[in-house]
Image (spheres, grey):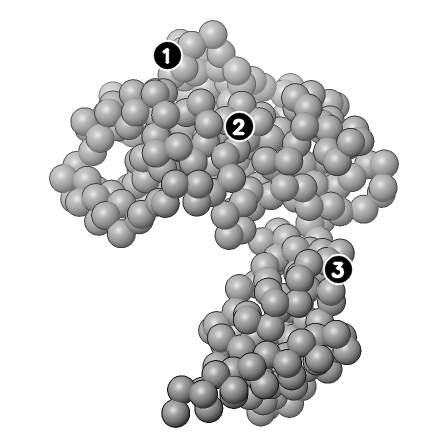
Amino acid sequence: MLQTSARLLRLLSLLQSRPDWPGTELAERLGVTTRTVRRDIDRLRDLGYPVDSTPGIAGGYRLGVGAALPPLLLDDDEAVAVAVGLRAAAAGWVTGMDESSLRALSKIEQILPSRLRHRVNGLQSAIMLLPGDCPVVDADVLTALAAACRAHEGVRFGYRDATRRVEPYRLVRAGRNWYLLAYDLDRDDWRTFRVDRLTAPVQPGPRFTPRPEPEGDAAKYVADSLARAPYRYQATILFHAPLEQVAQTSSPTAGRLEARDEHSCLYYTGAEVLEAIAVYIVLKGFEFEVLDPPELKEFVAGLADRLARSVAGAE
């Protein structure tokens, strides 16, 4: 009985780790026959877990949507991540989640082993939020997008006074904002959407076959797309320092670095005002040259003169 129970827990953990599992692959992971897998699936169903199956040689299993929420299995890292996330949501990062987050948090922390509770407290003690620090994201929108990403289901929503039909792939947290990486069906290309700017309810669409993700890295693609955003001013800066050193002081969402040689690199960035670019590159602390645009060259030259005069006047 103990062996069977342990196998059921392992099977449940596998089903929760990804949307679809072929029966043969489950049998291989568990070290049993496909017939045993079928029996174990029936046992999970008897316990209230909604497991959907696809018949045939290439058939498989996936966790479905049930009438009630059965218990979930979490490993140590997942439990810590959930607890920290719930504390953040209770603090107001996601609108409408404060009360429900506190209820869920109380249940999880009640059963956390002491070693995990110390990890959660240690992480949380190092996090401080200022009022208005982050744009507030609607909990229903974030949940709907996450579910659509997992189930490979298309969605429709309003964005910048237009209706967008997309295949959602990843939710990426960059800086203070949440972004959705999706394939825009009307524009036939990959797009990045800022979640707090969605202006209409997320409406479900048909399921889709996943495409290869751009450049194989969703986070990198989102960072590059933010750096290439159509700002009023697009700047090219030459830093007289190795790329590795400049990268340590740069956010991937603020600009793109490109090695020129082993002693220098190019930095591409943009902003709506020249002051933002000038302050950002000066504070990096490296020798630099403004290659483009001409307006930024003039602004930096004027800023240097003002700073020099302020020092001379103080002597």
- For mark 2, does the 10 Å Cα neighbourhood hold few (<14), some (14 to 19), or many (20 or more) residues? some
Discs 1, 3 touching: Cβ within 8 Å = no
Which disc is residue 232 wearing? 3
- Residue 156 is situated, as x and y percent measured from the top left of the image, at 73, 26
Considering depth in this image, is 208 or 237 the residue closer to the camera?
Answer: 237
Considering depth in this image, is 275 or 196 the residue closer to the camera?
Answer: 275
Amino acid type, label 1: Leu
Q: Which residue is mark 1?
A: 47
Q: Nearer the viewer, mark 1 or mark 2?
A: 2
- Residue 78 is situated, as x and y percent measured from the top left of the image, at 35, 40
Q: Nearer the viewer, mark 3 or mark 2?
A: 3
In three-dimensional space, the C-alpha distance between marks 3 and 2, rounded to whole angstroms, equals 29 Å
Q: What residue appears at the point 73 percent right and 58 percent down from the top-left corner?
A: 231
Q: What residue appears at the point 39 percent right and 32 percent down from the top-left corner?
A: 92
Residue 261 in the figure: left or right of residue 162: left
Q: Which residue is mark 2?
A: 138
